[in-house]
Image (cartoon, rainbow, N blue to C red):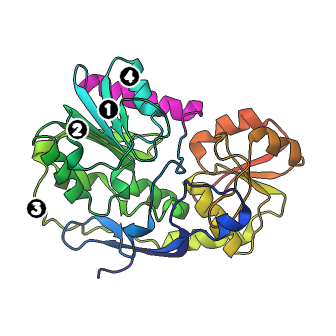
Amino acid sequence: MSAILYSARNLPVLQNTTFATKEEAQATQCGDVLLVADEKTGLIHNAAFEPEKLIYDVNYNNEQSRSPIYQSHQYAVCEIASRHFSGKSIVEIGCGKGAFLDLLKKRGFRIIGIDPAYDGNSPDVIKEYFNPDLGVRGDVIILRHVLEHIQYPKDFLASVLSSNGGKGLVYIEVPCFEWICNNHTWFDIFYEHVNYFRMADFGRMFGNIIESGHIFGGQYMYVVAELCTLRSANDEVATNAPSFSRLDEHRSILKNLPQRPRAIWGAASKGVIFAKQLLEFGVNVDMAIDINPAKQGRFLPGSGLYVASPQEALESLPAGAHIYVMNSNYLDEVRAMGGGGFHYRITEPEGVTK
């Protein structure tokens, strides 16, 4: 096995499933992360990943569409779709709760979704994992935040290509691994994410990329490519695998955070990992805060941290409390909701800062 780039033990295997009680949340199944670069493909992946530990169902909820900032991101993706997919039939694999699918439908796109976590009643969504036997084809395949969850992404893409009749365009959107490294966001390493991509990885995967770029403040990257140019073999090795020593160093600063009271704003993946490792350093947190009603009144996996609505949290936190905003993209939005009287702190870049 290649050299380990980064390791973390006992991370909750699902970051976007909350629990009814603290005890259930703390007893959730956990797994280890051992990030390595594949010697043949150069892809960075978790060598300790066990796919049978993950079950995505209606209890899985990573919906962010209530945030105006995230809505702006979705609108930006819609503009990319308008440039390349107008008049084409679309299949969105991994459509989640269907928010982006609904947004495209409102703009006149013909689209079908596939996702076992979907809990709505739209006839345009198939509540299953993708498999070729579904017999679903489209001029365009959308994979937004899907490939990082797939153990063998090239095999998966080959399966999609075959089931789609050997043709079509594909839109792929994934977290940007360079952004994670440059900003030292060790709490962006999740068990759910078995793969961590760089733009060069897609350059090796596809012979024809029509458009590519970085979005959502650089945290995500995307490609629009011709599916039929998916390369069957990839012998190029990534020789510039990043060092994770600074991530380990930044994780240790958790011991020096200001004293309570303090809260985490953002009960999604970043907040789940941040809270779990805070507790491992003996740092207590009063609560997590999230605008998603499906998470409010419930408890985060691993840490068992209670999730409050913004109203509940802001009524109970005293003036001067420290609120850690888990994603700097949302800092202005959080400040607008929270008002004055609190110390808002972001967690990147360069560790935890004001």
Above or below — where is 283 with respect to 137? below
Q: Which residue is label 1 attached to?
A: 112
Q: Which residue is label 2 attached to?
A: 136
Range of residues picked out in magenta = 64-85
Above or below — where is 343 with respect to 251? above
| Callout 2 amino acid | Val
Near mark 4 (Cα within 10 A), the count class, few <14, some 14-19 or many ≥20, is: few
| Callout 4 amino acid | Lys
**Which circle's residue, 4 or 2, is located before the other in the chain?**
4
Please identify, in this view, whether the residue under mark 4 or under mark 3 is nearer the observer.
4
| Callout 1 amino acid | Ile
**Which circle's residue, 4 or 3, is located before the other in the chain?**
4
Please identify, in this view, whether the residue under mark 4 or under mark 1 is nearer the observer.
1
Residue 1 shown in magenta: no
Nearer to me, 317 or 57: 57
Please identify, in this view, whether the residue under mark 2 or under mark 3 is nearer the observer.
2
Q: Are marks 1 and 2 in contact (CB under 8 Å)?
A: yes
For mark 1, give the secondary structure.
Answer: strand
Asked whether, in this view, residue 202 is left or right of residue 48, the answer is: left
Q: CA distance from mark 2 to mark 3?
A: 26 Å
Above or below — where is 12 with respect to 161? below
Q: Residue 153's spot in the image, x, y percent?
A: 26, 58
Q: CA distance from mark 4 to mark 2?
A: 18 Å
Q: Which residue is label 3 attached to?
A: 233
Q: Residue 53's spot in the image, x, y percent?
A: 44, 68
Q: Which numbered tag is attached to residue 303?
A: none
